[in-house]
Amino acid sequence: MNHDPNLAIDELAELLAKSNPAVARQRAHALLVLHPKVAELWRLSAIAALQLGDYDAADAMLENALELAPNLIEAWCNRASLQAMRGDIAAAESTLQHALILAPGHVAALNNRGRLRHARSDYAGAAQDFSAALRSQPDYANGWLNLAAAQQALQDFSAAENSARRALVLAPNWPDAWFVLGTALAKQQRGGDAIAAYRTTLAHAPRHAQAAYNLALELEEKGDWFAAARACEHALDAAPDAYAALAELVFLKRRLCEWDGLDALSARLLEAVDRGEEGITPFSFLAEAATPAQQLKCARRFAQTQQEVAAPLAARLRFPAAQGSAPTSEKLRIGFFSAGFGEHPTALLIFELIERLRSSSIHTIAFATTSDEGGNSRQRLMAGFHEFHDLGGFTLEQTARAVAAAKSDILIDLDGYCSGSMPALFALKLAPIQVNWLAYPGTLGADYYDYLIADHFVVPAIQRAFYSEAIARLPRCFQPNDGTRVIATPLARHDYGLPESGIVFASFNNSYKFTLRTFTRWMKILAGVPGSVLWLLASPPGTSTDANLRRAAQVAGIDPQRLMFAPKIAHAQHLARYIHTDLFLDSNPYNAHTTASDALWAGCPLLTQPGNTFASRVAGSLNHHLGLHELNTDSDQAYVDLAITLGRDPARLRELRERLAAAKNVSGLFDMQSYAQDFERLLIAMFARRQRGETATDLDLF
């Protein structure tokens, strides 16, 4: 029998170190009979009980330990752990605070309190605790990683990078540290370095699903869609329920036009949305054959995650309820928030509208979340808005402070869930009225957006129930158009690589919109119009998309060389291509949007098949408001039949072009002065309801 208390403590500690709590607890009973006044034995016995899940016994033993040794800091830390396990985080923090009063620099107490603060989203407090602990113990690798995680949550990515690197100096092969480093690098737009860090993570931990998914995102951003898709497959192999990776894989395979096996993956994605799984991005989901109800459910689930992202910031900053500027301001202050204020489709649509609004009764404010690249588009927008705030590179907190300081009466989100968007900012509710408009063709599923600006065609009454926002309908197409777009002098057909004769069909959409259903229709059209070609945008160099499309054409019995690929060129030169294009063939279920406006402005008729979702009805709305109703077909067969009929009748195609040219001048689709007046009236109507104390409701201008 061991009569030396120190040897008894060593014996019990060794048993616990060997992860044998049952034996340790049994031995502790015997040792405590011999040494009932040794506080450390009571503490170690409590740890054994904790490991066995006997919280009541652990609590009693810690009480005994602290009665014997009130300044035993480790026992106070153990009590805090027990309280946290029971879910009483406030009590755990209070206990650790008491421990730190007794021993202000105690490393374990500081780290434990830091973890608790991090868990309840007090990232600033957590960072303070981790930093204090590291001043006492700078060789603690876990402490540096804890600090990096807190700094990352605070969006101080440079500091997070430095902390992760300190952890890696101490533990060079630690996959978690490599992963945190990769995330910090990615957030600093250092994609190449982030890719290397994620690959190192996977070298040390091949089943690290999140690292594989993050690697895929960086590879996609770099333009290596094929490698990105393979990284997503790796993530799903490691974690079949990684639904963010599933959504990304489906989207990447659509970009690559890798249709083999895609139907099964898409079905899994739809089922995941139906179950309410987390991580599925609504934007990529727009390209799926989903119902409006499924799109709403996907958006709502994603909106919940954005509220969770915003909640800690909202609690820390405590912004007052947004009041805007009125009635102290002479004009309504309308904020336009976007990542597209540069060489971007959004800018191409809004140039003239913003310029027309300069002479209106509203004061326009731009919040640009991407940095100025020095292009003409940015310069034109800066001149068009009354105020222009360059927020490129800002963190969410910095962006929120800048937007709140500008005091918008109405804040319009031009991004929604598109690439580069910041929906968590809108979850902070920084303006009295918040509006979803333009780039994202669908509902955002969030109660912090008051209105969606639409028209009667894109959101018909029969689909109204599938939109969470109040619908504010313009008496015209919701999509503005720049009537000042310049069309360059076209080259000859052969200079574009086109044959000297024959009908030219085109679809200059992004490849993720090319479903197998759409492509099958196109191949039937080419088969029905001998000598015709299909003109598509070339995919980025190094991707296999164009080769996959030509391979699919061959399988369909069409000469692959009848698919022509147009490289990316300046916008005015791109518009000139439509001079040689006889008919634009739209895609389903995700239409051409800005691309459709380009085609129509350049005089090229557009054939579409409106569906049941917003994204599938935009091109149809453009045709509807031009009076070209016959180009909105109601079935796949009608779409194919009309394309073939037109392709075999050049005279009818010429007549369509003439009608389109006339409609451009009289339909109002390209009349931005009238659009600006309607847009202004709609915003004033929204604000008037607010001033009367009324909630957002559907608005219709006539």
Image: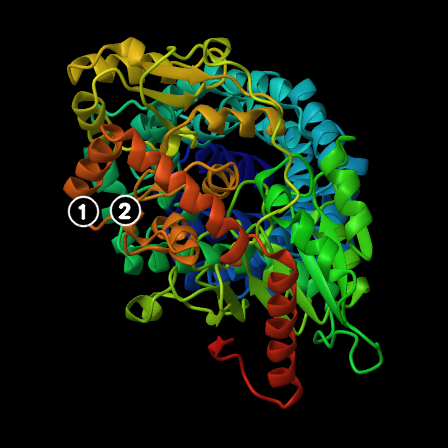
Q: Is residue 514 above or below residue 539?
A: below
Q: Which residue is mark 1?
A: 635
Kindly report the distance in space between the C-alpha atoms of the residues bearing marks 1 and 2: 7 Å
| Disc number placed over residue 646 in the picture, else none | none
Marks 1 & 2, CB-CB < 8 Å contact: yes
Amino acid found under the numbered disc labelled 2: Gln
Amino acid found under the numbered disc labelled 1: Ser
Q: Earlier in the sequence, mark 1 or mark 2?
A: 2
User: Residue 245's quadrant in the figure?
Assistant: top left
Callout 1 environment at 10 Å: few (<14), some (14 to 19), or many (20+)? few
What is the x, y in percent for residue 637?
15, 40
Q: Which residue is mark 2?
A: 609
What is the x, y in percent for residue 74?
64, 49
What is the x, y in percent for residue 100?
75, 55
Q: Is residue 80 above or below residue 228?
A: below
User: Please, which colouring scheme is shown?
Assistant: rainbow
Horizontal placement of 197 versus 622: left or right?
right
What is the x, y in percent for residue 610?
30, 51
Helix, strand, or loop for circle 2? Answer: loop
Callout 2 environment at 10 Å: few (<14), some (14 to 19), or many (20+)? many
